[in-house]
Amino acid sequence: MEQKKTTSIDQEKVIEVKGLYKSFGSYDVLKGVDLDLYKGENLVVLGKSGTGKSVLIKILVGLLSPDEGEVKVLGQHVDQISYKELLALRLKVGFSFQNSALYDSMTVRQNLEFPLVRNQRRLTKGEVNQAVERVLDAVGLLQTINQMPSELSGGQRKRVGIARTLILQPEVMLYDEPTAGLDPITCLEINSLINEVQERFHTSSIVITHDLTCAKAVGNRVAMLLDGKFERQGTFDEVFNTSDERVKPFYDYNFIQ
Ligand SMILES: Nc1ncnc2c1ncn2[C@@H]1O[C@H](COP(=O)(O)OP(=O)(O)OP(=O)(O)O)[C@@H](O)[C@H]1O
């Protein structure tokens, strides 16, 4: 199984979460989450369905507010800033959705132009073209520029989705199950792309996945959400070298079927 190459990681934190609690009614989802994302690292977040991974991401981008705790993204307390500041912060945090979320009625080029034209109105046509071609080239799909999303494979749509997130030059990338629903070979290609994005664009990323091959290939560190907290954090081997009965089934399900 592919193991992530060592990359040099800064000690600067781009995300800092301390003592985060979030409940819905009487249901306590996050119960004292502590998590740091360092500049330049890929951090993989694992956890069973319904453990609160999406809730955490929504809190990070200010779509949900924490009940308690501190949440700092790129130096700003997301629950204490104005809406205008939040919108500006969100532009620095790229979110790559699970279903790629491309507009079916637009070509690949138009899909990529859309976030740029909406957010950076002063760009000339030439600058927009250059930005579109740069990110499409980075994901290896320049040849699809005039195609419709329906003409692309699932893996290609995923790549265009990642390119569309990259076009605003985010400092932080959030990948939501990037390999879900893809065949094993395409999964490997997406894993490589996540690593290439890290190296080429110097992004810091959180990768939510259930796919341990992906976790091992892309994660500088892995954090596992167990009973509302990140009780296990470390390298892939550190997290899985345990007899913890809550952790073993993840490994067994992925590798011993
Ligand atoms: N707005 C909300 N109102 C009420 N309950 C919610 C809300 N958002 C999430 N929940 C609950 O919080 C829990 C955690 O949900 P979340 O979507 O974060 O899980 P997850 O770990 O991302 O799961 P999966 O791996 O299946 O995507 C679930 O039980 C969900 O029903």
Image: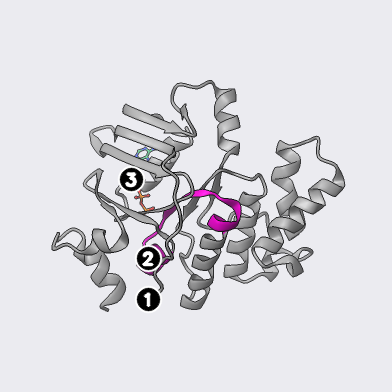
State the image coordinates of residue 33 (x, y, percent, origin top left): 28, 39
For residue 79, what is the image quadrant? Answer: top left
140 relative position to 178: left or right: right
Three-letter amino acid code at disc 3? Gly
Helix, strand or loop at mark 1: loop
Earlier in the chain: of badge 3 and badge 1, it is 1
- Of marks 3 and 1, the one in the foreground: 1
Q: Nearer the viewer, mark 2 or mark 3?
A: 2
Bin the neighbour count of mark 2 within 10 Å (Cα to Cα): few under 14, some 14-19, many 20 and up: many
Q: How many labels does the image show?
A: 3
Q: Please give the residue where the numbered disc 2 appears in the rendered image.
A: 216
Q: Where is residue 107 in the image (x, y as percent from the top left)?
A: 75, 59
Give the CA separation, mark 2 to mark 1: 8 Å
Considering only vertical position in the picture, is 172 above or below 209?
A: above
In the image, is the residue at mark 2 within 8 Å of ligand 1 by its beta carbon? no
Q: Can residue 106 be seen in this view?
A: no
Instruction: Tell me if label 2 and label 1 are in contact, CB under 8 Å.
Output: yes
Amino acid marked by disc 1: Met
Circle 1 packing at 10 Å, graded few (<14), some (14-19), many (20+), is few
| Crowdedness near tag 3: few (<14), some (14–19) or many (≥20) residues, C-alpha within 10 Å | many
Disc 1 target residue: 1
- The reply to whether dot 3 and dot 1 touch (C-beta < 8 Å) is no
**Vertical position of residue 182 compared to residue 131: above or below:** below
Residue 52, numbered circle: 3
* Quadrant in which the C terminus appears: bottom left
Q: Is mark 3 on a helix, strand or loop?
A: loop
Q: Look at the image and give the residue range highlighted in magenta.
A: 197-217
